[in-house]
Amino acid sequence: MNFHKALMELSHSPAFINRERSHKLAAMTALCAELLDVERVSVWQFPEQREHIESEWLHTPEGATAETRSLYQSGNPAYFAALESERVLSVPHAQEDCRTRAFSPGYLAPMGIRSMLDAPIFDGARLSGVVCLESTTHRQWTLPEISFVIAIADTVSLMNTHEAWLDSKQALEYATRYDSLTGLLNIKSLRDRISYLIDKFERRGLGSLALLWVDVDRLKSINDGLGAQVGDNVIEEIGQRLKQVIVPGKDLLARIGGDEYALIIRNQTQPDTLEQTAAKIRHEISKPIRLNGHSITVGASLGICHLPGDCDSTEDLLRGAEAAMYNAKHEGRGRTCFFDSSIQISARSRFELENDLRTAIREHKLDVFYQPITSADGSSTESVEALVRWQHPERGWLSPIEFLDIARGGGLMYGLGECVLRRVCEHWQWARNHQIELPEVSVNLAPEQVLIAGLPRQIKTICAEYGVPVRSLHFEVTEDALQGDIITISGILEELVAAGAQLSIDDFGTGYSSLSRLKGLPFSRIKIDRSFISNIPDDEDDCAIILSILGLARGLGLSVVAEGVETEAHERWLCEQGCDYLQGYLYSRPLPFDQLVERFFTSE
Ligand code: C2E
Ligand code: CA
Ligand code: CA
């Protein structure tokens, strides 16, 4: 029998190729034992640490075993050196041979092994294992026998290479289909799945799906404030929650970008079912996330698009869901929005709008309106709040809710802040030149601004340019801007106060800052968010919150502004409770500078 022919027949049979590794080793060692008439045939491999070699498979007359035995290279240097250099070890007198006699007392002699024939397994140029034949009779190994053992070793080597290739192919497959951070499928998998489902629906002539696009709000400020690692942990945690949330018709969940996820829902696509699903998802996401000492709460905006109702292709479905999500954000975060065709238009123009905004900021084209803040007894206008406005060439006056998110997404907030401050300074300069004395001007600072160490210097430089004393400014910082690296932020705030400015905490009550966090910061005023004002005095909860904020402020020696005061009932209740300042439509809407001056600061 031709040894090589037998090995070829074995290794090319489908029964061999498709079996797992241990079956292949069993078949080859059995064939070898039979054809060469030896008792023991074993296959050994180096593990990762190469100081020893491990038996992977051993064929004996009593049966085969995959039990691991180890042989240490250090105890048998001559054997390993010979293996590496001689390609094959043909050893008729194993117990005496200088290459193998080190095994004699502990192994060869007690086992009665007389001859050995070993062939190294190379993976590339590196010795990775050995095929080992042991005979209890003296053998002068013949050339065909030697060449056969080499062929077996080469077959194992081919198996190793193939397995390594399969592993790397799988790793590659994993990388192209999965998101490494969350372990969820990625956008490619999502697209493939949608296309597959569309095909299936078309073939059957029925079926429907909805795509839920989930965007985590405020992740950017978490990244900026607490570091990218915390941001990553938040993304991971939300991925886990989405994986676990049970929703009807759930088909596939993917992470499709930075802080965005998408969920395919099949069949259960009636609006009210989806509405419930969306509410459940938002609820899961908004549960506090505890991460090394921080408790972080984030919200999410959701967009939903239907197929075939709203569109009929994969790309249109993705675009539609994304556009609906932007619309949800636009309407004020933490909402769900269904796609309709009008949204498509606004989504397309988002990108144009961002470009226009970039230009407007660069060319200092943004404008500022002012809203008075009055003392509670109505006797004086205590200060005015500067509120950015943008006169778009085609769309007319735009309010901040229409473009601040775009500015934020485009990284334009710092530039926007500078633009607003310059406009405020221009107005202030104009007033002084006309002998008009303006009260303090409140300027809003974005979270993106209070994280930049150079902010105080920038503000001082701009003020100096226009001859505006920093002490005539008051800066409003929202509660959620204080989430970030508190050392940096408090350094910046201290520097502003040292330069003479005053500071307010804006939108108080909506964030999650703990009192202890606020206590050390140099604020002189709290602005109660207008969402608490609108339902007083009827809503008992809101009243209780306002009272506790007033108590807290008194305890900390801070003054309090209520914003969004629209009715006399609001005013009466707030005055009775001892609120210091009031701001709202009841007194005035935000006005262009010239109207403000005319109404409030000219004697006639
Ligand atoms: P905010 O700082 O809370 O500003 C007050 C907002 O409430 C203003 O909206 C104002 O027009 C509105 N408002 C005032 N009184 C009433 C009222 O009685 N009822 C109701 N419903 N609303 C009232 P606006 O001007 O649209 O600004 C929205 C937000 O945009 C501001 O909220 C602020 O967070 C941001 N913002 C405005 N200007 C700037 C700016 O220059 N820089 C930055 N970073 N943010 C700005
Ligand atoms: Ca404000
Ligand atoms: Ca506010």
Image: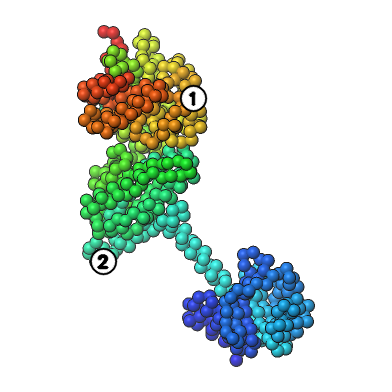
Question: On the image, numbered disc 2 is attached to which residue?
Answer: 203
- N-terminal of the pair, mark 1 or mark 2, is 2
> In which image quadrant can residue 140 be found?
bottom right
| Image position of 395 (left or right of 290) | left
Viewer can see residue 412? no
Q: Residue at x 28, y 45 (%)?
A: 336
Asked whether 84 or 55 is in front, the reply is: 55
> In which image quadrant can residue 379 be found?
top left
Disc sitting over residue 494 in the figure: 1
Asked whether 104 or 312 is in front, the reply is: 104
- Cα distance between the residues tagged 1 and 2: 67 Å
Classed neighbour count for the residue bearing mark 2: other residues with Cα under 10 Å, few (<14), some (14–19), many (≥20): few
Residue 227 versus residue 171 in the image, above or below? above
| Image position of 547 (left or right of 74) | left
Q: Which residue is drawn at 54% across and 77% down?
A: 22
Residue 175 versus residue 13 in the image, above or below? above
Looking at the image, is mark 1 or mark 2 nearer the viewer? Answer: 1
Quadrant where the N terminus sits is bottom right
Q: Residue at x 74, y 79 (%)?
A: 104
Query: Residue flagged by tag 2: what amino acid is it?
Result: Arg
> In which image quadrant can residue 139 be found?
bottom right
Q: Residue at x 40, y 53 (%)?
A: 240
Asked whether 551 or 206 is in front, the reply is: 551
Query: Residue flagged by tag 1: what amino acid is it?
Result: Glu
